[in-house]
Image: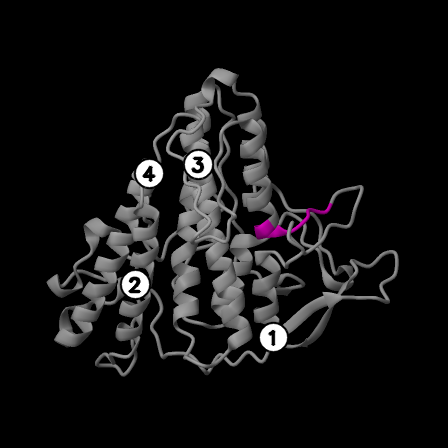
Amino acid sequence: METPEGPDIGEVRLAWIEPASVLGVRKLVQGAIDIEFATLPPYLYASMTILPETNAAAKARLQSIIMQEMIHMCLACNIMNAIGGTVRVNAPSYPGHLPGDVGGKLVIHLYPFSPEAMAQGMAIEKPLDPVQPKLLRSGAKSPVTIGEYYERLKAALCKLPASAWKPNRNQVNDGQFFQGQVFAVHNCDDACRAIDQIVSEGEGTPVTPENKGSPLDFQNELAHFYRFWEVYRNQVIEKDVAAGPDDSGYKWGGTLGVDYAQSYPAIVDPEEHKFKGESAAVRAAQDKCNAAYAAMIAALAAAFSGKNGQLGVGVRAMFDLRMAAIQALNTPMKNGKVAGPAFLPPKRSGASKGAAA
């Protein structure tokens, strides 16, 4: 059923247990890390499957979202290290629910570039009460959205005693790869700044009794939910200079030039495909994707445990993954379709051994 926010495919609703100790807070921070990492594969799969030299506006939006999700993960890891915890980089399987999602309806798939992929991105990033162009606003939903999870996490962090904070512990502070937006977290104020950035870039400024909210983040750019919505509708959200006092101040503008036909004929959820009967070239391409993804996870885990230079190794592994994906997406299977990376958890990778990949 179509609603003003997009198709009704479900929403993320996260479990929240009020923490009674710093150990409880660390568990909740790990939940935030898991969520941020789990969004990367579906967003990457959609972006990777756009044919070269096509859909420039859509691809730019997806790539900016992916970059910011990496930044969000780094900031969440910095928070974990600042309160004395140990970061774990947990790779989920697809299809499946987001980590901690108790809503039950929204199953995350690896969709190629398509309306389904954009609708899924909207569902993941959806604020509690989205700002609607011309205020086509629905009623508030029940908690807990990702944004609400972070707001509650912020409150829990601020209740920790000063002794819980460990300044300069395993902090990633690297402007070389992430546009200077990754900064060290030493105390509650730094953690709150990090969370505000994460929520703002994902959902925009929330609607409150005092204001109508905004689809813009702290940098005056559209938040992730609204960028997905633009691609889904193939329209730009722009300022409405003629907006009345009851309007949001934004309206739908011109088209983005989205053409979903200009994408690789990629299958959904490669993990569910049995590659054992495919050609050696197809299996080798999947193996390269699995190896690059495993290397990326290992390097990120090392970086967040305080090993110098590993963040750069992880970024290079992501580049290797993109190159492996290009090879896979240009290697037809027996059915004439292609498969991008399955984003298999490392312990389960090994397409050439006949695993479901």
Q: Which residue is mark 1?
A: 234
Q: Position of residue 336 (x, y in %)?
A: 27, 83
Q: Position of residue 50 (x, y in %)?
A: 43, 75
Question: How far separated are the C-alphas under marks 2 and 1?
Answer: 29 Å
Q: Is residue 97 left or right of residue 119?
A: left
Question: How far separated are the C-alphas under marks 4 and 1?
Answer: 38 Å
| The quadrant where residue 80 appears | top left
Q: Secondary structure at mark 1?
A: loop
Q: Which residue is mark 4?
A: 88
Mark before the other along the chain sequence, 2 or 1: 1
Hey, what amino acid is under mark 3? Answer: Asn
Question: How far separated are the C-alphas under marks 4 and 2?
Answer: 21 Å
Hey, what amino acid is under mark 4? Answer: Arg
* Numbered disc in front, either 4 or 2: 2
Question: How far separated are the C-alphas under marks 1 and 3?
Answer: 36 Å
Q: Position of residue 135 (x, y in %)?
A: 77, 59
Q: Residue at x 46, y 19 (%)?
A: 164
